Image: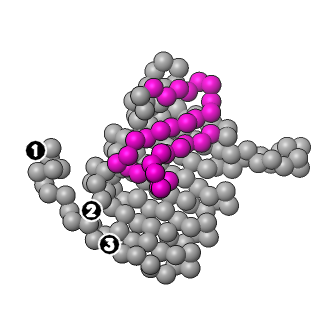
């Protein structure tokens, strides 16, 4: 007999995720402040709850389009702005954001709430904006930044994290 796993998907209209850090839109090492406008969700000590249970599943963010013609038609009147995986109330797995024009804005991978792996960002025109590698929230390896025309404008190399730091020793 085949078994199927169903992941709960929650659709939030006009939801927003706000990451607080002075001078930056988001910092994987900094505090995570989440604001979600949906009555069933709450945030306590940076844990996302659905009712009284830490949320496990996928949060879909959509933004409503204020357009009278769309409201009177069968065409959806919202755009996808984010898709975020959670486990036990914290980000775990892939997290994506899109610009309002439909182009990818960012792609992150989280492990127990901490950015791990490749983090990528794109300009509104679809060209790469930045690419960084993380090991459990710490930058390592090559970091690259491009302007809106696709010209490489900044390149940094971060020292790899010593093995004893990875193992927690």
Residue that badge 3 annotates:
156
Decide which of tag 3 and tag 1 comes sooner along the chain. Answer: 3
Residue 66, how many percent across, how many down?
80, 47
Q: Which mark is residue 71?
A: none
Residue that badge 1 annotates:
169
Decide which of tag 1 and tag 2 comes sooner along the chain. Answer: 2
In the rendered image of this protein, does residue 83 appear above or below residue 12? below
Visible residue check, residue 3: no
Residue that badge 2 annotates:
140
Instruction: Give the position of the N terminus as an image quadrant.
Output: top left
Q: Residues within 10 Å of mark 2 (few under 14, many from 20)?
A: some
Q: Is residue 139 magenta?
A: no
Residue 64, how many percent across, how many down?
73, 44
| Segment colored magenta | 15-44
Q: Is residue 29 magenta?
A: yes
| Residue at image coords 62%, 58% | 99
| Residue at image coords 47%, 38% | 33
In the rendered image of this protein, does residue 122 appear above or below residue 154? above
In space, the residues marked 3 and 2 are separated at their CA atoms by: 10 Å
In space, the residues marked 3 and 1 are separated at their CA atoms by: 27 Å
In space, the residues marked 1 and 2 are separated at their CA atoms by: 19 Å
């Amino acid at each position: 007999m085949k078994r199927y796993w169903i992941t709960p998907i929650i659709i939030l209209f006009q939801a927003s995720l706000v990451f607080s850090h002075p001078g930056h839109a988001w910092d994987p090492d900094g505090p995570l402040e989440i604001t979600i406008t949906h009555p069933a969700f709450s945030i306590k000590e940076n844990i996302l709850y659905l009712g009284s249970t830490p949320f496990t599943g996928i949060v879909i963010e959509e933004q409503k389009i204020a357009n009278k013609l769309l409201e009177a038609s069968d065409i959806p009147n919202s755009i996808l702005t984010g898709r975020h995986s959670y486990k036990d109330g914290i980000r775990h797995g892939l997290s994506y954001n899109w610009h309002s024009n439909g182009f990818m804005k960012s792609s992150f991978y989280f492990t127990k709430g901490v950015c791990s792996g490749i983090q990528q960002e794109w300009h509104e025109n679809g060209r790469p904006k930045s690419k960084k590698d993380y090991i459990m929230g710490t930058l390592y390896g090559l970091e690259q930044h491009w302007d809106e025309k696709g010209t490489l404008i900044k390149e940094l190399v971060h020292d790899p994290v010593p093995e004893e730091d990875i193992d927690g020793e």
